Image (cartoon, rainbow, N blue to C red):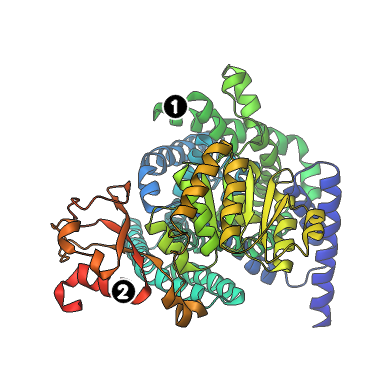
Amino acid sequence: MQELFIEVFGLLLSAVASVWLFKRLGLPVILAYLVTGIMAGPHGFDWLANESQMQAIAELGIVFLLFSLGLEFSLPRLIAMRNIVFGVGLLQVLLSSGAFFICLLIFGFDKLSAFAVATLVALSSTAVVVKCLKDSGQLQKRRGQLAVGVLLFQDLAVVPLLIAIPLLASNTDQSLFVSLGFALLKGALVCALLWAIGKWLLPLIFNEVARMRNEELFVLTTLLVTLFAGGLTHWFGLSMALGAFLAGMMLGESQYRHQLESDIRPFRDILMGLFFVTVGMQLSVIYVFSHLHIVLALLVIMMVCKCLILAMVAQAMGERKNDAVSAGLMLCQMGEFGFVLVALAKSYGILDSELSSLLIALGVLSMAITPYLIDWAPVWVSRLVFVPAEHVDDLHSTHDELSDHVIVCGYGRVGQNISRFLQAEALPFVAIDLDPYLVRQGRHANYPLMFGDVTQKSILAGAGAAQAQLVVITFTDLNKVKLVTEVIKEVAPKVNILARMPDDAHLDELKEAGVSEVVPESLEASLMLASHVLFMSGVPMKRIIRRVSQERENRYSLLHSFYISDEAPHREGSTDMLEYLHVMALADNAYAVGKKISELNLTHRRVSITAMRRGGREVENPSLDTILLGQDVLVLRGKPRRVERCERFLLNGGEAL
């Protein structure tokens, strides 16, 4: 136990020192981890006795990385990328493997060793490329999508390679095509199983977990789901990373996507660092320096050939020249699965020790160069393919759908009031809340809501805080407001912040913390806060005064109606004296379908339809002559018991009266 403690402590100390030094020198962090691995490995100081255990744990970094990558995708999006995955990806693997295979045969390699080397060199590094793309903000750009699509096919191609190499080496009677067909059948089965679990079971699980309002439970569930998906595919003989990606993709369409990514990030980053350390352990510095001219020559040849092949394939499939060349530069390295195939081929006697050392050196050095290639790819491509400077993306720019928008932290009563004002003025905004019921209700009403904890940087970054013009904090807990303000200032130092407080007792304290304005609470405070939001968003003051006056003339009727969380303690008791909003969808066979609103006679039940969404189009205060149709989404307003009775009436008819 003491020996393990010393090993882990030494590894952490070396990693911290290396990362600090490389960051100060402006070098990629991946290089720091590789250097740490070189020092700790058998070709360095060799202080790790449990190297195999470290490698097993480090592989979880790839699993968590692919899970977070899956959150960026969805099934429709993956289907839309099928031409990249099964078109560009397939051709890249076949042509690269074929080109290297022919070259190796010419230089005297036997067919079996030439096949093994050619196929493992054709693969690229998912771990390095995806991490660099996320860090540089290029994951959502076309060149990033192209690179990811090819990597997805390469991860799928590893499975038949893991089956083919042992069979080719053992010369058994077992048919290679039968084995590959059986592997494909198992792959289709496990993908269908994971799709079913992700489609129907996981949303129910996370809905229940989110209702508990316990952060530790949410994190534990996220880890459990990731490891379960990876373990399931591993049990079927497939890659753990593939299972994690599928699980993430299924959850990528849920309202919990941003919170899931935020929770998994610390584990992912730490384990990814450990993974790069284990990669560095495999490099022999002595071998590299003793064969430096051979290693460098083969490194250049390999990377140039892979870049050219992928660029030509992508262009032939209809991609733009600059995106094709950029993707080629991103994927010209060897991949982490190449190390697995090297070890497998070496164990079956296909590769000797010297050739294995050469391939490992090529893999580690090409990975070390990759961060520079990805960061500078846009600049180099603009010069190589003569793209005008104005069409070249900024080196570190990110793609965000919103800009100059308002972020509403908390979607309780006040948050909903502000959102209605913003929606009425057609001002872009995003509301964030940790209550899954409120998020679901707001989304059904077509409001832009995110599920997440606003005290986490990644959640605010996902809401586009850096591009926002205003952040509104609607809860009144002083410590939490100060914490959120501190986090906001780290993500977006120049953004304006409005905060709500019971009174102005802590006004100076909050102003010093970075809050621009502090507004006291009450119904009148709701109007004042909304007025500030509209004014800072550029709405003329006359229009603001007119709208606020109109609300006062209506005796705050709209402000008295709000969505109530099913977990809130105020759901019963005094709330029955207040009106609230409730979203419902009409089934095709509902009682109200085909009837005019006037025929339903809702007025004497003291319930009104304040809004309706049909086919993606919103209608505020629909007229009494409106005929209701199946799949219409209605927003009902009234006291809780009356709204519940009205909903049953609209669905089932008179028996609910």
Label 2: state its secondary structure.
helix
> For the N terminus, which image quadrant?
bottom right
Three-letter residue code for mark 1? Gln
In the rendered image, residue 296, in percent from the top left (x then y), is placed at: 72, 35
Say which residue appears at 44% left-offset and 31% top-offset: 313
Which of label 1 and label 2 is nearer to you?
2
The residue labelled by disc 1 is 315
Q: Is residue 229 left or right of residue 362?
A: left
Say which residue appears at 55% left-offset and 61% top-offset: 414
The residue labelled by disc 2 is 642
Three-letter residue code for mark 2? Arg
383 vs 564: above or below = above
Q: First in sequence: mark 1 or mark 2?
A: 1
Residue nearest the observer in this picture, 519 or 289: 519
Q: Quadrant of residue 586?
A: bottom left
Q: Is residue 297 left or right of residue 169?
A: right
Residue nearest the observer in this picture, 95 or 620: 620
Q: Is residue 40 left or right of residue 545?
A: right
